[in-house]
Image (tube, coloured by chain):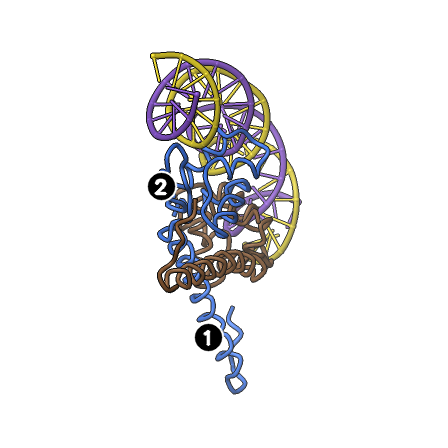
Chain colours: A brown, B blue, C purple, D yellow
Amino acid sequence: MSIFAALADPTRRGIVESLARGALSSGEIADQFDISASAISQHLKVLREAQMVRVRAEAQRRIYELDPQGVNELAGWVDELRSYWATRFDALEAELRKPAGKSRKR
Amino acid sequence: MSIFAALADPTRRGIVESLARGALSSGEIADQFDISASAISQHLKVLREAQMVRVRAEAQRRIYELDPQGVNELAGWVDELRSYWATRFDALEAELRKPAGKSRKR
DNA sequence: TTGTTATTTTAGTATTTGCTAAATTAAGCA
DNA sequence: TGCTTAATTTAGCAAATACTAAAATAACAA
């Protein structure tokens, strides 16, 4: 799950948000930010290694798009967190619903 | 969205996963990892600032639990990413479903 | 070929991060 | 009042990160 490390950087998060709207070349991505093409390329490498994006070559251009692999992995982690949490609340709710209770633990 | 920066660290992710199963004191959290209580305290501070966890005092103990604020913010970002993406696939699907097409751009 | 465009890789650097050890704060107990 | 327990804060340091500038790769165009 180094996906979170990949998304820790605001520029990389911006790249992912852009790619959610459609595939873009490295240069098109670079145009959207105030840093060098080199820096963008390095960010794209991190996103690639985290499987958040994938590339295909088109002449001398590199076209980037979101990688379902990483998106699903991320979504899975978050969904799991949410579901454990939901379970807890259900349990708490059930507890509160009990008659009058002798409880108050500790 | 510094939530992703907060979750970039594997120890902090572990803390969040533990808290998804229920509230824990600082010490109970520290017991689950091989680093000092000081290091855990610093991680908890990062998670608190990102609003991923919140604390309440109980005598000299600090009880930590997941903060709905951050969990919802994170889930929201991921859901939005997913929904933009779903829209794109619907559009692509519609495109592919078209009669026979004169297309093939560029 | 030589030049141009698109992109990546390498080197070097300043900043940030995660850790430990030591000091500090604060509540409960003798 | 001290001691003990639980936790945080501070200082200092080694490792990781994000950047720029410069060099390298590679495809197309003259």
Q: Secondary structure at mark 2?
A: strand
Residue B91: numbered disc:
1
Q: Chain of mark 2?
A: B
Image location of residue A93, percent across then percent down: 39, 62
Mark 2 is surrounded, within 10 Å at the Cα level, by few (under 14), some (14 to 19) or many (20 or more) other residues, namely: few
Q: Callout 1: few (<14), some (14-19), or many (20+) C-alpha neighbours within 10 Å?
A: few
- Disc nearest the viewer among 2 and 1: 2
Q: Is residue C28 above or below residue A16?
A: above
Residue B10 percent location from the top left of the image: 55, 42
- Callout 1 amino acid: Ala
- Which of marks 1 and 2 precedes in the sequence? 2
Give the residue pinned by disc 2: B56
Q: Is residue D1 left or right of residue A35?
A: left
Instruction: Using the image as rendered, state which of residue A102 and residue B70 is in the foreground.
Output: A102
Instruction: Examine the rendered structure and indicate whether residue A40 appears above or below residue B91.
Output: above
Q: Decide which of B63, A79 is in the foreground and name it.
A: B63
Indicate the position of residue D29 as horizontal and vertical percent values: 55, 57
The numbered dot on residue B68 is: none
Tell me residue A69's x, y (percent). 59, 60
Q: Residue at x 42, y 54 (%)?
A: B74
The Cα atoms of the two marked residues, 2 and 1, are separated by 48 Å
Q: Amino acid at mark 2?
A: Arg
Q: Residue furthest bottom?
A: B99
